[in-house]
Image (tube, rainbow, N blue to C red):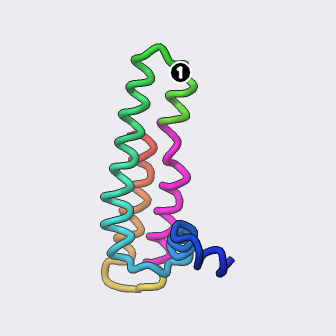
Amino acid sequence: MENVAAKNPIVAYVTSLWRGELPLGRVFWSDMLIIGTVVNVAAMIAAILLFVSSAPITIGVVVHFSPVPYNLLLLLGVWHAAQRETSDWSFAAQAIAVVWFIAMLVI
């Protein structure tokens, strides 16, 4: 797996995120709250556009929930990084990540 991760930056990112090797601040603020929220809002807008068009409802539902695996990866990335980087806000980051994950299921 290490050889594949060295050749592919996406695999390297996902592996580092999963293992909690990325800095907690980056994973929490940049990856989860900013990028993750933008991805979810974009999926929501796309799903709404599909719902109001003549597209089948199933396609809109699939588009709406398509970010869920990424959201789960972000949640676990924050969780693992907080476990590795024990600080004053580690628990708060984990709790906010869980709330964010639940909120993104709705958005």
What kind of secondary structure does the magenta stretch mostly adopt? Answer: helix
Work out whether 31 lies above or below 21. Answer: above
Q: Residue furthest front?
A: 7
Q: Nearer the viewer, residue 19 or 53?
A: 53
Instruction: Tell me the crowding category of disc 1: few under 14, some 14 to 19, or many 20 or more residues within 10 angstroms, Cα based.
Output: some
Residue occupying the point 51% across, 71% down: 9
Q: Name the one closer to the observer, 76 or 56.
A: 56
Out of 84 and 51, give the one closest to the viewer.
Answer: 51
Q: Residue at x 44, y 21 (%)?
A: 51
Would residue 76 be counted in the magenta stretch? Answer: yes
Q: Is residue 65 magenta?
A: yes
Image spot of residue 10 (x, y percent): 52, 66
Q: Amino acid at mark 1?
A: Ile
Query: Where the N terminus falls, by quadrant?
Result: bottom right
Relative to the observer, which residue lies in front, 9 or 83?
A: 9
User: Magenta residues, as a range?
Assistant: 64-81
Residue 72, x across and y down, in percent? 52, 57
Secondary structure state at the residue bearing disc 1: helix
Q: Is residue 26 left or right of residue 57?
A: left
| Point 45% across, 78% down: residue | 81
With respect to residue 88, does 79 lie above or below?
above
Question: Residue 40's spot in the image, x, y percent?
Answer: 39, 45
Image quarter hosting the C terminus: top left
Tally of marks: 1
Query: Residue at position x 40%, y 62% from top?
Result: 97
Residue beneath disc 1: 57
From the top left corner, tell me how far across and down residue 82 is, in percent: 43, 78
Outermost residue on the right side: it is 1
